[in-house]
Image: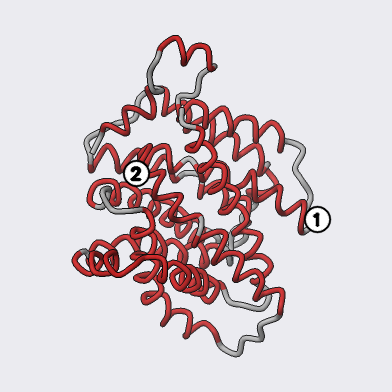
């Protein structure tokens, strides 16, 4: 196992977990759809000068793919989760978001005709259980009329899974930076009218500005190219398990920066999440890896697939 794969997963988990903290900091002043628009717009503006003329010209020839991925990877799930957060708890949102690997496995089986093996099914079950332990029963309380919110969140998680498989199938040869920039620009255009309609009279505080910059830079401009490099190197199944890490780091950042309580089962749940990552990535003891002299089978199989 290349250490950079594990480090990349950990950074994405930390960055996406931090996104929930940034959204909570910005939420009192800025509507959710405006935060979503700001996130993709800030990240797109940061990555645009780094792309270079050659990448920008190459993106023009595949603009339809970028529209599709920008819709399913950003515009649609961001809007759906923004709607869902009006009626479901953050804990339940984390649980539903953690179904992304399950949806990814379903789309891999349907689109690429490749069903996950027993090891990966076990990893999904263990990781999902770990997220559940972290959240606890108190995080699963449903408000009246929350069925629509649950359905929206489930659709958002499925959208992430579909986007990762689509990228793997049709856009794998492209550079991670190009992939990130193309869909960020497409998502910015799609979210702009929704953000304008929901903005109203917004009074933005300094704290909200810092939160918007944090989610745009740390959780998107830096994290998304890393995420798409993972998708290219280890495949959508392993990449999607980053959603198991989100509540781990979200809980840590919430406790450190917002003085939020930590559930009694946090350490046990976090341990289950890391066991899940070990299963999905095929991690073994160094001596055994050396003796076998090969790449962990779980990741290698997905690397060989289209």
Q: Is residue 11 above or below residue 293?
A: below
Q: Local crowd at mark 2 within 10 Å, few (<14), some, or many (≥20)?
A: many
Using the image, tell me which numbered label, if any, was put on residue 37.
none
- The location of residue 304, given as percent across then percent down, is 27, 31
Residue at (49% x, 24% y) in the render: 283
How many numbered callouts? 2
Q: Which color mode does the image show? A: secondary structure
Which quadrant of the rendered structure holds the C terminus? top left
Quarter of image, res 280? top left
Residue identifier under label 1: 259
The residue shown at (24%, 46%) is: 169
Q: Which mark is residue 232?
A: 2
Q: Residue at x 32, y 60 (%)?
A: 69
**Left or right of 292 in this view: 7:** right
Provide the secondary structure element on which disc 1 rests.
Answer: loop
Would you say the residues marked 1 and 2 are in contact, meaning their CB atoms lie under 8 Å apart?
no
Where residue 240 appears, as percent x and y from the top left, is 44, 43
Q: Measure how far apart labels 1 and 2 are at the Cα level.
A: 37 Å
Q: Residue furthest left?
A: 61
Q: Is residue 259 left or right of residue 148?
A: right
Please say if 118 is above or below 186: above
Position above or below: 114 against 297: below
Mark 2 lies on a secondary structure that is helix
* Front in this rendered view, residue 285 or 245: 285
- Which residue is situated farthest in the bottom direction here? 201
Whichever of callouts 1 and 2 sits on the residue coming sooner in the sequence is: 2
Horizontally, residue 97 falls left or right of residue 306, namely right
User: Within 10 angstroms of label 1, few (less than 14), some, or many (20 or more) residues?
Assistant: few
Residue 251 at x, y percent in the picture: 69, 48
**Residue at the spot x=55%, y=72% of the render?**
35
């Amino acid at each position: 196992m290349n250490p950079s794969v594990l480090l990349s997963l950990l950074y994405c988990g930390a960055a996406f977990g931090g996104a929930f903290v940034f959204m909570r900091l910005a939420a009192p002043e800025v509507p959710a759809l405006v935060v979503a628009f700001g996130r993709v717009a800030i990240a797109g503006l940061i990555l645009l000068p780094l792309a270079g003329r050659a990448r920008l010209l190459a993106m023009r020839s595949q603009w339809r793919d970028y529209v599709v991925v920008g819709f399913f990877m950003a515009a649609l799930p961001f809007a759906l989760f923004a709607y869902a957060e009006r009626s479901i708890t953050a804990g339940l949102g984390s649980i539903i978001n953690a179904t992304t690997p399950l949806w990814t496995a379903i789309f891999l089986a349907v689109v690429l005709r490749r069903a996950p093996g027993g090891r990966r099914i076990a990893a999904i079950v263990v990781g999902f259980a770990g997220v559940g332990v972290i959240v606890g029963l108190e995080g699963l309380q449903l408000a009246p009329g929350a069925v629509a919110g649950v359905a929206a969140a489930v659709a958002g998680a499925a959208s992430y899974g579909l986007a990762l498989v689509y990228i793997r199938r049709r856009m794998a040869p492209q550079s991670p930076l190009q992939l990130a920039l193309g869909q960020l620009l497409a998502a910015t255009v799609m979210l702009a009218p929704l953000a304008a309609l929901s903005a109203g009279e917004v009074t933005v505080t300094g704290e909200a500005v810092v939160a918007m910059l944090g989610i745009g830079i740390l959780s998107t401009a830096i994290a998304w190219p890393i995420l798409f490099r993972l998708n290219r190197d280890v495949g959508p199944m392993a990449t999607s398990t980053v959603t198991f890490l989100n509540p781990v780091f979200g809980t840590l950042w919430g406790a450190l920066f917002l003085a939020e309580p930590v559930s009694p089962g946090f350490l046990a749940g976090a341990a289950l999440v890391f066991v899940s990552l070990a299963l999905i990535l095929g991690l073994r003891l160094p001596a055994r890896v050396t003796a076998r002299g090969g790449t962990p089978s779980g990741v290698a199989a997905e690397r060989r697939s289209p």
